[in-house]
Image (cartoon, grey):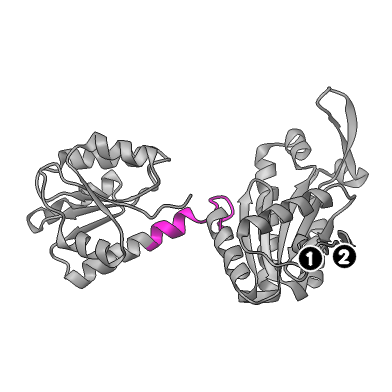
Amino acid sequence: MRTRPTILFFSPEARAVPGLIGGWAQANALPVETFTDADAVEAIVLRGHPSLLFVDADGSDAEGLALVRRLKSDAFTAIVPVTALVGTHQAARVEQWFAAGADEVITNLFSAGEQRARVEAMVLRTERDVSVHPSTRLPGTTEIEREIRRQVESDREFAVCYADLDHFKEFNDRYSYYDGDRVIYILSRILHDVVKGMLGARGFVGHIGGDDFLFVIPAAEISPVCSEVLSVFDTLVPLQYNEQDRRAGYFFGKDRRGQLHRVPLMTLSIGIVTNRNRRFTHPAQVSELATEMKSYAKTLPGSVFVVDRRRGIDNDERAGSQARDQR
């Protein structure tokens, strides 16, 4: 379930919430919770969704600095944006707060307008940083859901394309996770460069995680875009194998029982869902069907894209089955 972010204000000396925070929170309809105990703040951050944390640094700042260091030392809590509010007489200690890991430091030397602008910029930076996949810098699941929701709520014909590597695990086992990461990065560049190169702002590419990617394009562009993706993929990915495996077109790997079997070179399967024959009301419906189509595509040999041409259940009919489109 989604929850609106909560603003946390930590003041060891129990000062009142500053007007900057109160006014900004009210303007954005966000609740503010105040704390005098650093352990209580840390507990909230650990068990809840990341919140905005403001630390009162106008008095004794030892507790605040220690709290920020603890939060920023843990990858789970480090994503919480922390802003230190430093009084004019302590402006010289700004470096200490940045060294502790604070994302922003605001002093009374800034005008009220600049203070608000710095808070807004800090929030935007944080949202940007946590919404992309760190290895590919493509939008992650949060942005993917937002994009699908935008498409569902529009009146345009769209296609959601779920791309997944075949025989990737066996490649990792034979070579290394480093080589596997390189393949994932190459795939991310292929998808981004082809989709953005052919469609510009009309295309969206996201990284679900691992070797799973999702891109959203106009329904009319399915064939040219997906054909180009598969063509570039089948040209570049064989080059990630050694010469012997590449020439043979396979290598011998062990299955779960330890039996040797031929493992083909990696291929790419793309399962595609459109709103041409059905109406969606929620991103989860699109995601479920896209996953189903991706699984079906993986049962077919070679690099393929498969389009769901079935009609919605509400029409009480199945006009056409999955269509296999191959280069």
Q: Which mark is residue 267?
A: none
Location of residue 90 with respect to 69 vertically, above or below: below
Q: Residue at x 33, y 60 (%)?
A: 122
Q: Which residue is mark 1?
A: 315
* Pointers 2 and 1 in contact (C-beta within 8 Å): yes
Kindly indicate the quadrant of the structure image that contains residue 43.
top left
Magenta-span inclusion, residue 138: yes
Say which quadrant the C terminus sits in. bottom right
Residue 224, percent from left and from top: 80, 72
Q: Horizontal placement of 144 versus 225: left or right?
A: left
User: For mark 2, does the 10 Å Cα neighbourhood hold few (<14), some (14 to 19), or many (20 or more) residues?
Assistant: few
Q: Which residues are magenta?
A: 124-140
Kindly report the distance in space between the C-alpha atoms of the residues bearing marks 2 and 1: 10 Å
Location of residue 227 with respect to 302 vertically, above or below: below
Camera sees residue 23: yes
Camera sees residue 70: no
- Callout 1: SS: helix
- Callout 2: SS: loop
Residue 209, percent from left and from top: 62, 48
Q: Residue furthest right?
A: 248
Magenta-span inclusion, residue 22: no
Looking at the image, which is closer to me, 123 or 220? 220
Amino acid, disc 1: Asn
Of marks 2 and 1, the one in the foreground: 1
Q: Which residue is mark 2?
A: 319
Amino acid, disc 2: Ala
Q: Residue at x 80, y 26 (%)?
A: 256
User: For mark 1, does the 10 Å Cα neighbourhood hold few (<14), some (14 to 19), or many (20 or more) residues?
Assistant: few
Residue 252, percent from left and from top: 88, 33
Q: Residue at x 67, y 62 (%)?
A: 215
Residue 158, percent from left and from top: 70, 71
